Amino acid sequence: MPVVGDQTTASLAVPTHDVTTLATLTVTSPAGAVSTPVVTPVDNGATWTAPVAYTVAGLWRLSWTVTGTGAAVDHQVVSVAPVPSLLEDGRAYATTTDLANYLGTGAPVSAPRLLLRASELLDSDFLVAAVYDVDTDGMPTHPLVLKGFRDAVCAQVEFWGEVGEETDISGPLQGAQIGSVNLQFGAGSNRSGPSYYAPKLGRALRAIPSEHIRFVVTAGC
């Protein structure tokens, strides 16, 4: 899969061709911008090539049009990945260095995204009713609270590394049937509920001294 910034050579094979054969290429970016790179014949027209520069992530469409002998239209869709990020936009409670130290090994290349997602999970599922001192960016100011949040998100990323992040979408795999594949995810009437959270996440939060964080219980009207 190409990455933003790559320049690749697109090619099209035209098995049936002669001197009347001509190929052109139209490139459409994910935003709909259209370009027509210079196309060059190879092997007397058996193959046609063109340089394509990918400037943004997303799906690009390469549309070849062949006229003359071998006339045809061919559409190719190319998925372009973003440049790997060392820091995701958003508030994360741990850095990739924190994660590497927590794991005792190198952090995965997807660590920035995973740490951000784990921090979002912590905010939405655990800290909505929590009261603690924060700075102007919403980050905890007490080092023990910050350590607890850091360890919690690192534990969640470690958990995803073992069970797969997809369990946060479909729930863990509960069963499978060989032949006419039948996969069962999540909970059902005869199955226990899925665990989306790392056990060590809860322990990291409970380790924060109660004088520095409290959880407010609200009752519905």
Image (cartoon, grey):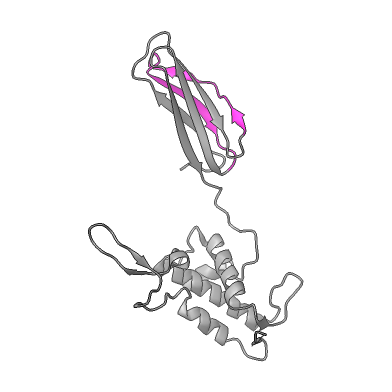
For the point 49% across and 69% down, which residue is it? 157
Please, is residue 118 above or below residue 148 in the view? above
Q: Give yes or no for residue 34 being in the magenta stretch.
A: yes
Please, is residue 27 above or below residue 68 in the view? below
Please, is residue 98 above or below residue 182 in the view? below
Q: Residue 46 lies in what quarter of the image?
A: top left
For the point 23% across and 61% down, which residue is it? 178
Q: Toward the viewer: 103 or 129? A: 129
Q: Quadrant of the C terminus?
A: bottom right
- Looking at this view, name the residue that lies furthest to the bottom: 211
Looking at the rendered structure, the number of numbered marks drawn on it comes to 0
- Looking at this view, name the residue that lies furthest to the left: 179
Residue 164 at what x, y percent from top left? Answer: 42, 65
Q: Toward the viewer: 101 or 168? A: 168
Residue 100 at what x, y percent from top left? Answer: 51, 68
- Looking at this view, name the residue that lies furthest to the right: 136
Magenta extent: 33-56
For the point 47% across and 73% down, which residue is it? 196
214 relative to 39 in the view: left or right = right
Q: Is residue 124 visible?
A: yes
- Looking at this view, name the residue that lies furthest to the front: 221
Q: Toward the viewer: 30 or 42? A: 30
Q: Is residue 7 visible?
A: no
Please, is residue 129 above or below residue 62 in the view? below
Q: Residue 215 lies in what quarter of the image?
A: bottom right
